[in-house]
Amino acid sequence: MSTPRKQKHLHQFDPRVVSPLSRILLAAEGTVTNLLEAYLLEPMDLEKLGQTQRRLARPLPLLGLPRGAAILDREILLVGHETRAPYLYAVSRIALDHLDGKVRDTLLGTQKSLGKILQEHRVETTWEMLGYQIKKAGSVGPLLGLSTGAPLLQRTYRISVRGLPTFLITEEFSPHLGLSVPSRRDRSR
C-alpha cells in the first residue's frame, strides 16, 4: 500500500499495525458501500443524519472553491439492512456546481449513498487519498455503538468529477466490521 500524501490534520500510522480488512478499506478507491455489502453479505441502508446546502463563508482550497460557492454538507450513517448495525459514519462536503443537474437532484432527494449515485449516473471520477488515522471516537462513538474513548479508523479522500474536485469525504469505520484497531500504546511498539 502506498503512503498517501500527508495532511496536517491527519496523523499517519504504519498500516501494518491494522488488520487486512482495515488496510483494504483504507486503500479502496472512492466510496466503500459495494465493498461493505460484499464483505458483510448484507445490503447497506443510508441514514442521513444531516444535510445542509449553503454558501461558503470562506474559500475551501481542498475543493478549489472560492468564498460564496454553493456547497452541500452531508452527514450519514451506513447501517446493515437486516441487522441495523452501524458500520460507517461519513461527513461529506460537496461542490454542488461541479455536478450536473440529474446527479445533484438524486443526491438532494434520495437516501442513496454517494457511491450508488455515481454508479447509477455513470459518473467518471478520479480519487485521491488525503490521509488516514486512528483516533478516539469522540461524539461519533455512540452513533457506532462505541464509547467516546474507543479507537476508530478514519480516512479522508477527495473525488473529482470532470477534473474538478467535487467531494471531500471523511469516513470513520465501526469495529463491528471486525476491524483490528490498536490502541495508541500498541501502535507505538
Image: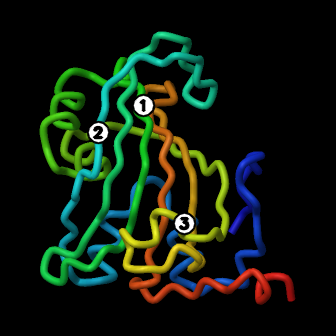
Q: What kind of element bears circle 1? A: strand
Q: Which residue is mark 1?
A: 161
Tag 2 or tag 3, which sits nearer the N-term?
Answer: 2
Q: Which residue is at the front of the view, 82 or 39?
A: 82
Relative to 172, say whether 31 is above or below. Answer: above
Instruction: Give the side of residue 62 with respect to residue 173, left or right.
Output: right
Q: Earlier in the sequence, mark 1 or mark 2?
A: 2
Query: Within 10 angstroms of label 3, few (less than 14), some, or many (20 or more) residues?
Result: some
Q: Quadrant of the image for the N terminus?
A: bottom right
Is residue 106 positioned above or below 10 on the image? Answer: above
Residue 116: horizontal and vertical position, in percent? 24, 52
Residue at 77 percent of width and 75 percent of height: 14
Q: Nearer the viewer, residue 14 or 182?
A: 182
Q: Residue at x 19, y 50 (%)?
A: 112
Measured along the vertical axis of the image, is residue 94 above or below residue 6? above
Residue sitting at x 40%, y 33%: 94
Give the residue pinned by disc 3.
Answer: 138
Q: Are marks 1 and 3 in contact (CB under 8 Å)?
A: no
Q: Is residue 145 above or below residue 159?
A: below
> What amino acid type is highlighted by mark number 2?
Gln
Rendered location of residue 188, percent (x, y): 85, 82
